[in-house]
Amino acid sequence: MRQRGLVAVLEDIHDPHNAAAILRTAEAFGISDIALIFEKEKYWNPRRVGSSSSASANKWLRFSIYRSTQACLGDLRKKGFEIVATGLTQDSKSLLQSKLTGRKVAVFFGNEHRGLSPLALRSADHVVRIPMRGMVQSLNVSVSAAIVLWEIVRQRSSNPRKHRLSGRDRRAFMHDMIRAAS
C-alpha cells in the first residue's frame, strides 16, 4: 500500500519532535520517501529522532538530506516531480480545490516560525493552504502535514494502480528496509 511518487519535504524544521510526528504520519499514509533540508537549521539525524513521537516510523522510511533548498528543488525537478508548497500567500489555493494526483508530487513543509523559504514558494507549481474557519490562520507544522498528506493520499486513492508500488519497487523497498534494519 506504499505510495509511489510522493515525497514529503521538510525544509529547515527546527524541532526534531515536530519532524518525528510528520515522519509517523507519512509512514502511516504509506509515504516512504522523505527529503530533509538543513540550510538554516542545525542538522539532526532523522534515523535517531524521537523514537517515541515517531513510533519508530523512521526505520521504515528512506531519507534524502540536502544542505540547500536549491539543491533539493534541482534534484526533484530532474526526477520529474511536481512541486507543491504549503503556505498562506496571496496566490495560494485551498487544499480542497487543488488537484494533487500527479504521478510524482513533492510537497514542501516549512519552518515552524518562518514557514517556507521564498525560494520554495517561488519555485512551486502549486501553493496550497488549509482552509481555516477560525481567527487563527496557522497550525503546528506536524498537524498541517497530517492534513495535507491525508488529502493528497485521499485524492490519489481514486486511481490506486497509478500510485501503488510495482512488484519491482516493492522488492527494492523491502531490500532497503532489511538493509536499514541490519
Image: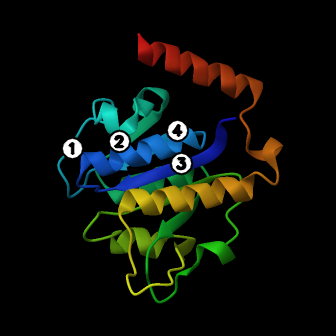
SS for dot 2: strand
Q: Label 4: which residue?
A: 27
Give amino acid for label 1. Answer: Tyr
Give amino acid for label 3. Answer: Val
User: Of the residues under marks 2 and 4, which one precedes in the sequence?
Assistant: 4
The residue lying at 82 percent from left, 42 percent from top is 161
SS for dot 4: helix
Q: CA distance from mark 1 to mark 2?
A: 9 Å
The residue lying at 57 percent from left, 73 percent from top is 126
The residue lying at 35 percent from left, 58 percent from top is 69
Determine crowd level at label 3: few under 14, some 14-19, many 20+ residues with C-alpha closer than 10 A: many
Residues marked 4 and 1 touching at CB (< 8 Å): no
* Residue 7: mark in rendering: 3
Determine crowd level at label 1: few under 14, some 14-19, many 20+ residues with C-alpha closer than 10 A: some
Residues marked 2 and 3 touching at CB (< 8 Å): no
SS for dot 3: strand
User: Of the residues under marks 4 and 1, which one precedes in the sequence?
Assistant: 4
Q: Label 2: which residue?
A: 65
Residue 173 position, x and y percent, is 59, 24
Q: CA distance from mark 4 to mark 3?
A: 11 Å
Give amino acid for label 4. Answer: Glu
User: Of the residues under marks 1 and 3, which one precedes in the sequence?
Assistant: 3
Q: CA distance from mark 2 to mark 3?
A: 13 Å
| Number of marks drawn | 4
Residue nearest the observer in this picture, 163 or 150: 150
Q: Label 1: which residue?
A: 43
Whether residue 49 is visible here, answered yes or no, is yes
Determine crowd level at label 2: few under 14, some 14-19, many 20+ residues with C-alpha closer than 10 A: some
Residue 28 position, x and y percent, is 55, 40
